[in-house]
Amino acid sequence: MTKFKIVTPAGASFTVAGGGYEYEMEALEGLGAEIVECPATEEGFIAAARDADAVYAKGMKFTRRMIEALERCRVIALGTVGVDYVDVAAATEKGIPVTNCPDTFIEEVADHAMMLLLAAHRRALEQDRMVREGRWGEGRPQLLQIPRLMGQTLGFIGFGRVARATARRAAPFGLRMLAFDPYVEELLMTPYGVQPASLSELLTHSDFVSMHLPDTPQTKGFLQEKHFRQMKKNAIFVNTGRGPTVVESALIRALQEGWIAGAGLDVFEVEPTRPDNPLHRMTNVILSPHNASASARFDPARKRRVGQELALVLTGRWPMSCVNPTVLQRSGLRRWQPYSMERGPNS
């Protein structure tokens, strides 16, 4: 007998071949929960999810109209870090917690950010082409114009989990590090060898600028032309955060006109990128298709996390990660505590 109905759009995004909900059901086993697929359309979702106990959000935009139609939903669970495809404000007004996976793919994204930084700095793609095209003699002269990495400055815009993991990787390379994040106090930066800075100071002094802001109404279009004009001419811009936080036309102009030296980009203002995007033709830019979080553990880790969050809320407990935590205070859910030898398991 089904006790909890969890509705999710048919199909999946950011996933490997295959299907099923085996990983999600590990935590839900024994709770009488069933994951029910519905059409991946607004109307199809509304028809199927009105009486849902929970929503597993994936594969489409979740609009205010869809969320307002939910009559008994206790939680909207996402298997991603980003929550920009769900109207969180509407969910908050309905008193529905929205969960995500903010700490599941941190190491992969930090690896990718460091890879883009190093590859862009050492002109890896251009050097590769020189070998393949028989231009062997051009490789060394190009790199003789590039300063050594040690002693240069890396600036982080946003200093959350990914930026901190990237800082741990960057420190052994001898990079001096700055961070602009008005929501993170200095004492949380210094253990990583990072000094706080204003945005202007960071842009002016950094040889590498690494973008880590989420896509929110407050951060959309955060980096504009005036900011790229402040950067050093030798600066490399890296973005593994979200594309819409940057005015892409300003970045393109900065690269075309030599305000900065290059870029390593995993995210873009419009995804997938259009065939005529000028970034495709720039030899001083390294691109990847918004896959920084991907690894062999991507699907199992995120799906298990979704199942865990669903199970917690459906059994009356706080989720581990909630992007609108104010709803928890008035939800009646019990605060979740992880198992520890001192406390014992949560009862």
Image (cartoon, rainbow, N blue to C red):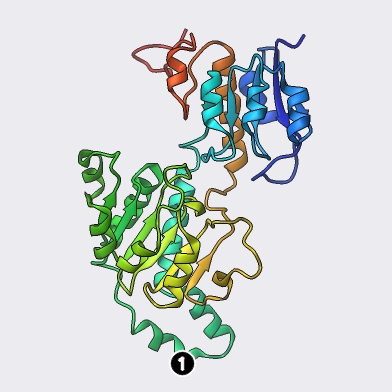
Observer-nearest of 343 and 197: 197
Answer with left or right where residue 59 lies relative to residue 255.
Answer: right
Instruction: Report if residue 269 is visible in the image.
Output: yes
Quadrant for residue 30, please give it.
top right
Per the image, label 1 sits on a secondary structure element best described as: helix
What residue appears at the point 51 percent right and 24 percent down from the top-left corner?
Answer: 92
Quadrant for residue 6, please give it.
top right
Q: Position of residue 272 (x, y in %)?
A: 64, 57
What residue did someone put label 1 on?
A: 137
Answer with left or right where residue 222 lies relative to residue 196.
Answer: right
Position of 63 relative to 308 (above/below): below
What residue appears at the point 23 percent right and 58 percent down from the top-left corner?
Answer: 201
**Mark 1 Cα within 10 Å, few/some/many (few <14, many 20+)?**
few
Q: Position of residue 219 (x, y in %)?
A: 42, 46
Answer with left or right where residue 87 lies relative to residue 197.
Answer: right
Position of 319 relative to 39 (above/below): above
Observer-nearest of 44 and 18: 44
Observer-nearest of 117 and 244: 244
